[in-house]
Amino acid sequence: MAEPLLAVEGLSKAFPGVQALRGVDFDVRPGEVHALIGENGAGKSTLIKILAGAHRRDAGRVLLRGREVDLRDPHEALAEGLSVIYQEFNLVPTLSVAQNIFLGREPGRGGWIDRGAIVRQAVAMLADLGVRIDPRVLVRTLGVAERQMVEITKALSSRSAQVLIMDEPTAPLTNREIEILFGVIRRLKAQGIGIIYISHRLEEVFAVADRVTVLRDGARILTEPVTSMDIGRLVFAMVGRHLEEEAAAPAAGAGGVVLEADGLTDGQRIRAVSLRVHAGEVVGLAGLVGSGRSELAHLLFGATRATAGSVRLDGRDVGRLGVGGRIAAGIGMVPEDRKLQGLILQLTVRDNATLATLGRYSRWGLLRRGVQERGVVHLIEELRIHTRGPRHPVRSLSGGNQQKVILARWLDAGARALILDEPTRGVDVGAKAEIYALIRRLQGAGAAILLISSDLPEVL
């Protein structure tokens, strides 16, 4: 058996009030894809941030090819051959694709950057990945899937990379782009590079990984060859209980039309789209990345203005209303990018959960904090949001719990129509089951739900 490229022994890390890692052992071998899975908050992100030099460990050892290393910052990790593709993008929007790919490693001589070489090398790398992106365009002009492919290309641009850590790399990708990524992974394996692969999509673990390690509550539960596992065992190891498949609730066909669009057009990507969502109904909206799904959601929510067509809620024309007016009318939205569009990361769970209902918690222009906090405590309990309390910073929550905070906002507002854009993106199986159950509950209460997803099984 080959000596591990990377090994951690007895790794522990604590934050105020939270033991994030508890004596974790883990290794990855040359030419191996080792999947690292677990619920949100299981310790995966803390582990990779220690390996990336972003966090300091409290106890334990990190070894590269048998040699103990002390990774004090991300530059040292890169120099040691550890490259990370984070779930949240780490790109500079105002720089070009090529400049982002080679940021900090620009080719040149005598202190001068060879801009032509940057573009030529970026063209070659993108072509090798099968990615059709002009390396001269600014990153801010790209869509989510295109930015993810730039992140992957950037990580591979370091020729010294021995271990590549991929954190949810396929979350925003189409099936075609996922196949391209898997092809790249197979080529990297053949070159002897070790890959740590983190994903909530368990089918990907079986498609691409050689071994799998499960973390739960900061501890390692198991490490096994993928060939000896099945999805049922993995889910049980992750959550410590069996998750029963949610039975599909029948649509309340007799319910009246709640959300309606006719001939909706934005003058760019959306052309004369019409749809109707009835009370007690979940309507799935499917399409490839770039097909206009999110743009349609923003038109319905009032975040962008339509150039033609109409939007009605319970028969009332709301097309002239902005976001605030549509929220007051009873429309809620969970956006695709929860951190950029759904949350104010500097605020607490309490403040984020009540953004749409501040008027209810105010009197004579003053916010009644006690009433607001009691309401949020109820929401935290009802949605099982894992947090230390209403005053906990929302930025410190896991992805699944951040998503629940946004859903709590619309539950608190009593939204009649809910637009859910990729509601389970980057969410673990336990939180996903809870979100599905909440959607069914809202449906049963008569809400009209438009569910947008690139995961076709989820839509079905």
Image (cartoon, helix red, strand yellow):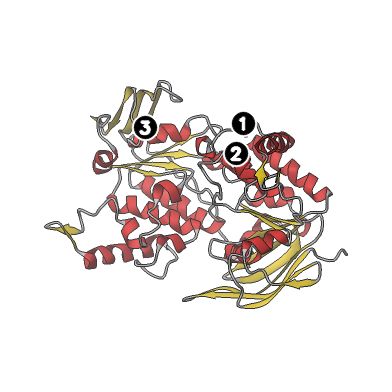
Instruction: Please tell me which of labels 1 and 2 falls first in the chain.
Output: 2
The disc label shown at residue 168, or none: none
Instruction: Please tell me which of labels 3 and 2 falls first in the chain.
Output: 2
- Is 261 left or right of 5, judged from the image as shown? left
Q: Find out whether the residues at labels 3 and 2 contact each other: C-beta distance under 8 Å.
A: no
Other-residue count near label 3 (Cα within 10 Å), few / some / many at <14 / 14–19 / ≥20: many
Q: Quadrant of residue 371?
A: bottom left
Q: Find out whether the residues at labels 1 and 3 contact each other: C-beta distance under 8 Å.
A: no
| 437 and 398: which is toward the camera | 398
Residue occupying image coordinates x 62% and y 32%: 133
User: Mark 3 or 2, which is nearer the eye?
Assistant: 2
Q: Find out whether the residues at labels 1 and 2 contact each other: C-beta distance under 8 Å.
A: yes
User: Mark 1 or 3, which is nearer the eye?
Assistant: 1
Residue occupying image coordinates x 35% and y 33%: 304
Q: Which residue is mark 3?
A: 299
Q: Which residue is mark 1?
A: 134
Instruction: Please tell me which of labels 1 and 3 falls first in the chain.
Output: 1
Horizontal and vertical percent position of residue 40: 54, 61
The disc label shown at residue 97, or none: 2
> Mark 2 belongs to which amino acid?
Val
- Is 181 left or right of 379, judged from the image as shown? right
- Is 365 left or right of 321, judged from the image as shown? left
Horizontal and vertical percent position of residue 83: 68, 55
